[in-house]
Image (cartoon, rainbow, N blue to C red):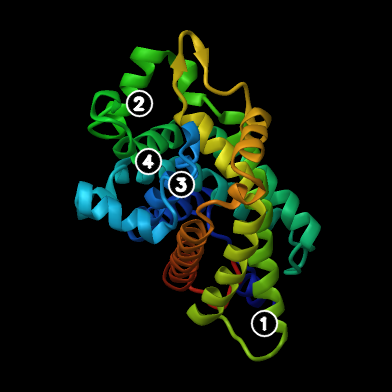
């Protein structure tokens, strides 16, 4: 009996492996959705300087970029996107899965409110770690919309980080950290909690079982909830991280100043400007990230820990 009980004892994926899997899943997903990230960032910046009609739709922007800058421009900033996932996603998914297990008692997962709280905590930690890469990503993807003499022309994420540090100071690497962490709280509370909850609900219906199709449906539901909830915070973050200092004064005083100017000059719906590239970037990224993560966890459980059917999220 004693040996049998030991055999049945549930083994856990080590914490360092969770961090590695989280970052790897996010990086793989980014390779597929980087063009949508670029479109999303450009759309969110398109209302600045009185250019509210700079791009009528995301499709109009896509055609403009391909025609004027070339197809491969859509992958501008990929190195920064990968760096962002290596820092931000590694931290947030690693911390979330670790906390998720701590709060699960006798195999019963925590409730929705607890999941949201875990997601917020994980998101804040990840956002702080990932802010420098995010600043580089925003600037690299936005560069093509500037006049030639105003472009920063960063060669890679490392060039961007070094030049920002050298030309603007260390703290500039964490510019927009507060709205970034605020956005991360919203995104992770919505994304991680809604993914876990959607997956749990779908399984309870009896029509779905562990597998890629279940992960896909739960991810698409999660992506929609997350997009609607986080876009206003995201657009404030994007504009702050891309802003320049003019005559010694920053373009914006803070997130509330950004939101106030958007509402005053562009209207309330501008807060959801770029909704479709954001969703079609966040939705597939969420889908791919969780699918890759679930497959990595499943493979680790099966081939390393020699056990199957272990719920991970």
Mark 4 vs mark 1, foreground winner is 4
Mark 2 vs mark 1, foreground winner is 2
Vertical relation: 17 (above or below) 163 = below
Measure the C-alpha gap from mark 2 to mark 3: 32 Å
Q: Are marks 1 and 3 in contact (CB under 8 Å)?
A: no
The residue under label 2 is: 161
Residue 265 seen: yes
Vertical relation: 116 (above or below) 232 = below
Residue 313 seen: no
* Mark closest to the chain's N terminus, 1 or 3: 3
The residue under label 1 is: 203
Vertical relation: 167 (above or below) 297 = above
* Mark closest to the chain's N terminus, 2 or 3: 3
| SS for dot 2 | helix
| SS for dot 3 | loop
Residue located at (47% from left, 63% from top):
280
| SS for dot 1 | helix
Q: Is residue 127 left or right of residue 86?
A: right
The residue under label 3 is: 53
Q: Quadrant of the N terminus?
A: bottom right
Is disc 2 surrounded by few (<14), some (14 to 19) or many (20+) residues within 10 Å? some
The residue under label 4 is: 83
Q: Nearer the viewer, residue 211 or 14?
A: 211
């Amino acid at each position: 009996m004693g040996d049998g009980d030991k055999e049945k004892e549930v083994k856990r994926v080590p914490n360092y492996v969770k961090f590695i899997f989280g970052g790897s899943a996010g990086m793989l997903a980014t390779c597929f959705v980087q063009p949508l990230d670029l479109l999303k960032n450009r759309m969110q910046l398109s209302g600045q300087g009185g250019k509210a009609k700079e791009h009528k739709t995301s499709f109009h922007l896509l055609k403009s970029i391909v025609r004027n800058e070339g197809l491969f421009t859509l992958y501008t900033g990929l190195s920064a996107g990968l760096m962002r996932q290596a820092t931000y996603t590694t931290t947030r998914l690693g911390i979330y899965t670790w906390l998720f297990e701590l709060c699960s008692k006798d195999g019963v997962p925590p409730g929705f409110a607890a999941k949201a709280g875990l997601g917020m905590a994980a998101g804040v930690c990840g956002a702080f770690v990932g802010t420098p890469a995010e600043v580089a990503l925003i600037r690299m993807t936005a560069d093509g919309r500037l006049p030639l003499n105003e472009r920063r022309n960063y060669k890679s994420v490392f060039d961007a980080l070094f030049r920002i540090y050298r030309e603007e100071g260390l703290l500039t690497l964490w510019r927009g950290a507060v709205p970034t962490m605020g956005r991360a709280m919203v995104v992770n509370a919505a994304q991680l909690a809604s993914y876990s909850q959607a997956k749990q609900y779908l399984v309870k219906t009896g029509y779905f079982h562990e597998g890629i199709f279940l992960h896909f449906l739960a991810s698409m539901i999660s992506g929609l909830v997350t997009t609607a909830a986080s876009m206003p915070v995201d657009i404030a973050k994007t504009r702050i991280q891309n802003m320049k200092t003019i005559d010694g004064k920053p373009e914006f005083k803070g997130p509330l100043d950004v939101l106030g100017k958007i509402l005053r000059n562009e209207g309330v719906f501008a807060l959801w400007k770029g909704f479709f590239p954001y969703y079609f970037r966040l939705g597939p990224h969420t889908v791919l990230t969780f699918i890759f993560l679930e497959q990595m966890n499943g493979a680790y459980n099966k081939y390393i820990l020699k056990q199957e059917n272990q719920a991970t999220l």
